[in-house]
Image (cartoon, grey):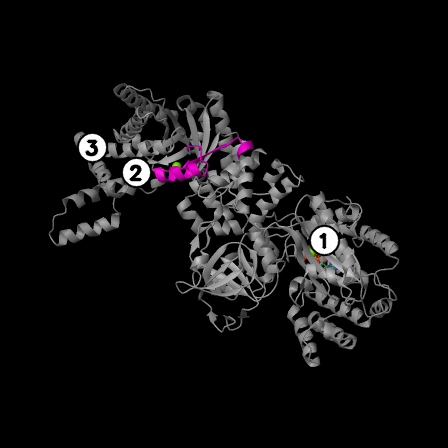
């Protein structure tokens, strides 16, 4: 295998092998853009190293070969004393992991070559500045020296001189600082800072490999669901210098605004600076637009290049660049992260620009982003009322409305959120060590840093609300408080609200209002209106693309007319699951009690007769709300004890009454019934179809209510399309018995009302046995609806109500699964049963209708799976319907 690729050899599609950074450096090189020459060591080499503990045998020679070629091209040798070639050693995995892996700049500098560099550049200060940076970065990332030691020494040097910023240190100061830094390295590591340039390079490469497995990197990968075995590539890139004086500098930019999607000039620039200086917030950056006044030629070239990149990648790109004495160099590009709103806007803008088609536009957005856009926002008009007050304003870095209690460090953020508190993490600026706290927090607020700061980039990636660079807020993490300009103090634990869409920071809890996207889905805002929100227009268009191409139909889980109507506004094409148990609650509970306690047939029939008209009225409303669309009604499913009083409460009541010699006959009978119905494993006990088989008349009453309601709607010239669904079937015999009874009832109603109802009768597939015998079950079923919640419970033997709290965290941490199987369908296990049952059912009955109800119906990844196995529809909660429509479209596009 080839382990090393020159930048001229790669391209953007080789991300698996060269990592994102390497692949894009190669792509830019081949586009003819000014990229400093270099080469990339592949992820394969990293994998060998991580597996075996040492670099592949062939690597050294291959690196030497490429280094020699680079030296020839540059006309100087790595670390050459009179004119050193310097390089950066940069990590770069397939997926960008902001701040996760460390980069070392200025490799090749040593006591011998520092003066050569000074002589060549004609700048002593620059050479010593570069050397101290090398020792600092190398010390910290390669030699594991505590970075604060270097920071403190730098602080001391500035203080001794009475200056505040690094550029005010001159060559003599920096040379002294290099001495201090070397002492720190010697003292902390027990050896001198390595002077051999090749040794520096090799050690740095290995450090990049090692950084793949730091806790920080592992945590980020788990959070972002990035596989742990990809490894990172390493880029060796010849140095260009932004720290060569005022005609040099370094910057970052976006080809359009990652928050709004608007085209324009977005970025930050810092004169006389190197590498991370821009994002680290060591000095205040200037807006990229101001570069035009400083260096018109470089600015013009940069604008040109940004346009080239956008047209080439057909997407928003972010870039890193450096200007060395008026010459522009491109150091990185990638398709940039963006907010959810910007993703929708950019996708439609690119369609309008003719850069991408509609199918591609669908791939540029996803359901998680749409769900994010449906979150409520702050009610601006409430500002200043009810004890809330605007206390500052920062940069709107990642949208959302977050409310929580102020915490000033990650540890507290994690601790408090574990105990159920909502927290806002407030920091001066964040760094990778804050990741845990950022994950735990509702939102993140910083007082320093811009749109490209660590906090902003990471928060956007996580879809978390973030306001950064709120400079008027004085954050004091040591005493855990923040002071506003007018002297208001926010202590740890005080409630604050932050708005990631406007950048506003409030003391107190600001009330929220619905998002415009929800207003649009609700039909209260029209995308066609002149003044319609830009975002709403974009969402409207994308949804139209999705609806046009999707094959899966989307239904709602809804039990009442109100939910049904909302679901319909959100685009539901029917109801996939109406749970009738919700119709047994409230004041009807007493009737259910009477049913359960009935001693004689007459008592039981009386109780059922009481329930019948109530159920019928529920169904009538539902069929009316969903007129013309299918409504799947599931007959009673849960164990009956759920409708009875709690056993302990009841026992106490009975005991008290006994002691007081009060009348308690009824409670006593209830208690006996509760005891009789008590089960060790109610979820595997008397429920679902089993209820229908042992409680005479129960299912018949429900079927009659459905049929009567349908007849009523028919007679009112409606178009009811009821489907009767039997839960928890394990064998076709159960279904046959229920079907026979149901058909008889339906026939009676049809005859009595003089209508033909065309009701269908199907079953849930939610037990492994049902899935395994689906071919037989289909003989008696008009449709299957996969109940993937119960199916997951029974296939895994997990009790959903118990395991998520007890051991799922451990399972997730150990990587046994990347995500809970109750959230995303377990394709290999549960999914494979769905696949085979669907196929077997259709062998028996080619026109068998197939759907899924349960949480998975609204989960993006699961929707793709259901599309792939050929189901007809998914059913999910009303609020998830737009997400399911979008994902069904993406799956089909
Ligand atoms: P990250 O992945 O954290 O962005 P990079 O490898 O891109 O790390 O490098 C960190 C910083 O150093 C960036 O600002 C980058 O532009 C700069 N840098 C990297 N290589 C060079 C180089 N050869 N010359 C000048 N600056 C560089
Ligand atoms: Mg970078
Ligand atoms: Mg179930």
> At x 58% / y 45%, what residue is drawn?
345
The answer to whether residue 1 is left or right of residue 607 is: right
Q: Nearer the viewer, residue 172 or 2?
A: 172
The answer to whether residue 526 is left or right of residue 202 is: left
Where residue 198 sits, quadrant-wise, is: bottom right
- Within 10 Å of the Cα at label 3, are there few (<14), some (14-19), or many (20+) other Cα atoms? many
Residue that label 2 marks: 583
Report whether the residue tagged 3 is closer than 8 Å to ligand 3.
no
Residue that label 3 marks: 604
> In which quadrant of this rendering is ligand 2 seen?
bottom right
- Real-space CA distance between mark 2 and mark 3, rounded to the nearest whole angstrom: 18 Å
- Real-space CA distance between mark 3 and mark 1, rounded to the nearest whole angstrom: 76 Å
**Considering only order in the chain, which callout, 1 or 3, is on the residue closer to the N terminus?**
1
Quarter the C terminus occupies? top right
Q: Secondary structure at mark 2?
A: helix
The circle drawn on residue 332 is 1
- Within 10 Å of the Cα at label 2, are there few (<14), some (14-19), or many (20+) other Cα atoms? some
**Considering only order in the chain, which callout, 2 or 1, is on the residue closer to the N terminus?**
1
> At x 41% / y 29%, what residue is drawn?
629
The answer to whether residue 195 is left or right of residue 556 is: right
Q: Secondary structure at mark 1?
A: strand
Q: Nearer the viewer, mark 3 or mark 1?
A: 1
Q: Nearer the viewer, residue 706 or 219?
A: 706
């Amino acid at each position: 295998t080839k382990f090393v690729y020159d930048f001229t050899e790669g391209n953007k599609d080789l991300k698996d092998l060269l990592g994102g950074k390497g692949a894009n450096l190669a792509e830019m090189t081949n586009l003819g853009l000014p990229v400093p020459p270099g080469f990339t060591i592949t992820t394969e080499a990293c994998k060998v190293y991580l597996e075996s503990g040492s670099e592949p045998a062939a690597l050294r020679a291959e690196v030497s070969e490429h280094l020699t070629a680079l030296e020839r091209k540059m006309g100087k040798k790595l670390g050459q004393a009179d004119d050193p070639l310097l390089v950066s050693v940069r990590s770069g995995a397939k997926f960008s992991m902001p701040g996760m892996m460390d980069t070392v700049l200025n490799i090749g500098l040593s006591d011998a070559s520092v003066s050569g560099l000074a002589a060549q550049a004609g700048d002593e200060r620059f050479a010593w500045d570069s050397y101290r940076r090398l020792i600092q970065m190398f010390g910290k990332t390669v030699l594991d020296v505590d970075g604060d030691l270097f920071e403190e020494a730098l602080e001391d040097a500035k203080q001794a001189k009475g200056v505040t910023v690094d550029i005010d240190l001159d060559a003599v100061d920096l040379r002294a600082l290099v001495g201090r830094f070397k002492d720190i390295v010697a003292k902390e590591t027990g050896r001198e800072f390595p002077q051999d340039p090749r040794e520096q390079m090799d050690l740095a490469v290995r450090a990049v490999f090692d950084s793949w497995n730091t806790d920080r990197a592992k945590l980020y990968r788990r959070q972002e669901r990035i596989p742990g075995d990809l490894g990172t590539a390493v880029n060796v890139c010849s140095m260009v210098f932004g720290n060569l004086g005022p005609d040099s500098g370094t910057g970052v930019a976006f080809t359009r605004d990652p928050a709004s999607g608007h085209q324009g000039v977005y970025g930050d620039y810092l004169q006389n600076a190197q590498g991370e200086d821009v994002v680290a917030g060591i000095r205040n950056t200037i807006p990229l637009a101001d570069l035009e006044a400083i260096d018109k030629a470089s600015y013009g070239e940069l604008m040109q290049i940004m346009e080239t990149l956008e047209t080439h990648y057909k997407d928003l790109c972010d870039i890193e660049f450096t200007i060395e004495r008026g010459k522009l160099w491109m150091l990185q590009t990638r398709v940039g992260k963006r907010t959810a709103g910007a993703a929708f806007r950019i996708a439609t803008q690119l369609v309008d620009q003719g850069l991408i088609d509609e199918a591609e536009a669908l791939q540029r957005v996803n359901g998680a982003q749409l769900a994010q856009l449906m979150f409520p926002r702050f009610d601006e008009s409430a500002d200043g009322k009810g004890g809330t007050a605007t206390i500052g304003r920062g940069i709107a870095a990642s949208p959302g409305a977050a409310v929580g209690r102020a915490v000033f460090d990650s540890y507290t953020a994690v601790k408090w959120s574990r105990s159920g508190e909502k927290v806002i993490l407030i920091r001066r600026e964040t760094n990778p060590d804050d990741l845990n706290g950022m994950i735990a927090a509702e939102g993140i607020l910083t007082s320093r840093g811009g749109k490209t700061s660590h906090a902003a980039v990471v928060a956007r990636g996580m879809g978390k609300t973030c306001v950064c660079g709120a400079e008027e807020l004085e954050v004091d993490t040591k005493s855990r408080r923040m002071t506003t300009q007018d002297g208001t103090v926010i202590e740890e634990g005080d409630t604050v609200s932050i708005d990631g869409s406007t950048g506003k920071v409030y003391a107190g809890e600001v009330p929220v209002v619905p998002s415009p996207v929800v207003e649009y889905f609700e039909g209260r805002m029209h995308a066609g209106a002149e003044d319609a929100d830009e975002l709403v227009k974009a969402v409207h268009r994308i949804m139209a693309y999705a609806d046009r191409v999707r094959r899966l139909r989307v239904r709602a889980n809804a039990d009442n007319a109100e939910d049904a109507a909302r679901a319909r506004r959100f685009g539901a094409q029917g109801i996939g699951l109406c749970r009738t148990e919700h119709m047994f609650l409230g004041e009807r509970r007493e009737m259910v009690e009477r049913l359960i306690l009935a001693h004689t047939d007459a008592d039981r029939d009386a109780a059922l007769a009481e329930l019948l008209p109530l159920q019928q009225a529920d169904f009538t409303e539902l069929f009316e709300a969903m007129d013309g669309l299918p409504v799947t009604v599931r007959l009673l499913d849960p164990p009956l004890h759920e409708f009875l009083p709690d056993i302990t409460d009841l026992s106490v009541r009975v005991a008290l009454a006994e002691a007081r010699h009060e009348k308690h006959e009824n409670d006593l009978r209830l208690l006996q019934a509760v005891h009789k119905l008590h089960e060790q494993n109610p979820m595997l006990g008397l429920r679902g179809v089993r209820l229908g088989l042992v409680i005479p008349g129960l299912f018949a009453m429900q079927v009659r209510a459905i049929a009567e309601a349908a007849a009523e709607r028919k007679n009112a010239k409606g178009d009811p399309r009821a489907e009767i669904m039997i839960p928890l079937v394990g064998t076709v015999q159960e279904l046959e018995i229920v079907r026979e009874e149901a058909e008889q009832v339906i026939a009676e109603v049809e005859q009595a009302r003089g209508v033909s109802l065309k009701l269908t009768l199907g079953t849930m597939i939610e037990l492994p046995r049902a899935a395994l015998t689906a071919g037989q079950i289909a003989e008696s079923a008009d449709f299957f609806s996969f109940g993937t919640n119960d199916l997951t419970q029974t296939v895994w033997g997990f009790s959903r109500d118990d395991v998520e709290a007890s051991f799922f965290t451990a399972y997730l941490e150990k990587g046994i699964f990347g995500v809970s199987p109750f959230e995303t369908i377990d394709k290999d296990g549960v999914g494979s049963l769905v696949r085979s049952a669907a196929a077997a059912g259709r062998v028996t009955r080619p026109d068998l209708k197939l759907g899924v109800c349960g949480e998975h119906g609204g989960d993006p990844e699961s929707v793709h799976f259901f599309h792939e196995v050929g189901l007809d529809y998914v059913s999910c909660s009303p609020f998830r319907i737009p997400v399911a429509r979008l994902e069904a479209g993406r799956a089909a596009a």
